[in-house]
Amino acid sequence: MNRSCGFLLLLFLTGPIAAFAEPAADTTPAATNSGAPAMSSEASQFDFMLGEWQLEVHPKVSGLVAMIHGAPRLIGTWKASRSSDGLGIEDDMRIVDGSGNPLSSNHSRRVYDTARHLWKLSGKDTQNGRSSEASGQWLNGEMHLDGKFIDAEGTTLTRTRYYDISANSFHMLQDRSTDNGQTWDEAVLTIDAKRAATNTPP
């Protein structure tokens, strides 16, 4: 599979708060009875990811490739839970092709930096040997992240956006640059996520 179909998946994702509206910056919930530290509302912006998701994955393909082979059918799962320290989200994404062959197995950790008012993400794709990192913030009901991943072919910059976020679905779109941001290949990867039928929103 070519580089555009190989996944970041630094998977740098996103999230809403109450009623999926942009949170007020000065709201700070009290600490839970479990002794977890109090968290600002911004620190819950990835909570929409909590639970289990079924994915349809759409890598960008050229017109000629699509004409000869058709668009590849890729599916996957995404599972996210609150980290044991209560300070972030940890998630696992797995992508397979239409025959069930594994293409990506990515583990990510997302932590909100209260000092810089940014999300910081780090990830590792054990299937492809990719490491990734990103940072970003919640803007106008969407999560916007700038990052990079590193693999055997070098460093690729990424711009990732999570949008159309609801209790039971969200979408992710990613642009990439292999020339340090001089030019960008847009919509290299899109993901449609739907909450698993056996799951209920957090």
Image (cartoon, grey):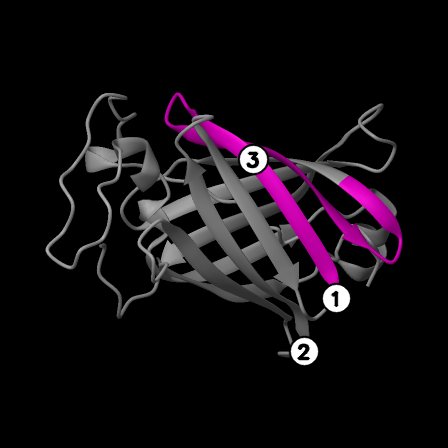
- Disc 1 residue crowd, few under 14, some 14–19, many 20+, Cα 10 Å: some
Which part of the image, by quadrant, shows the C terminus? bottom left
Kind of residue at disc 2? Asn
| Image quadrant where residue 7 sits | bottom right
Q: Which mark is residue 135?
A: 3
| Distance from Cα at disc 2 to Cα at disc 1 | 13 Å
Residue highlighted by disc 2: 101
Kind of residue at disc 1? Asn
Q: Nearer the viewer, mark 3 or mark 1?
A: 3
Residue at 82% over, 54% down: 3
Q: Which residues are magenta?
A: 129-156
Q: What SS does tag 2 mark?
A: loop
Residue 156 location (% of width, % of height): 79, 42
Q: Is 149 displayed left or right of 56 in the figure? A: right
Residue 25's place in the image compared with 43, above or below, is above
Residue contact at pointers 2 and 3, CB within 8 angstroms: no
Residue highlighted by disc 1: 128
Q: Earlier in the sequence, mark 2 or mark 1?
A: 2
Residue 138 lies within the magenta run: yes
| Image quadrant where residue 176 sits | top right
Residue at 70% over, 71% down: 127
Q: What SS does tag 3 mark?
A: strand
Residue 50 lies within the magenta run: no
| Distance from Cα at disc 2 to Cα at disc 3 | 31 Å
- Disc 3 residue crowd, few under 14, some 14–19, many 20+, Cα 10 Å: many
Q: Nearer the viewer, mark 2 or mark 3?
A: 3
Residue 191 location (% of width, % of height): 54, 49
Q: What SS does tag 1 mark?
A: loop
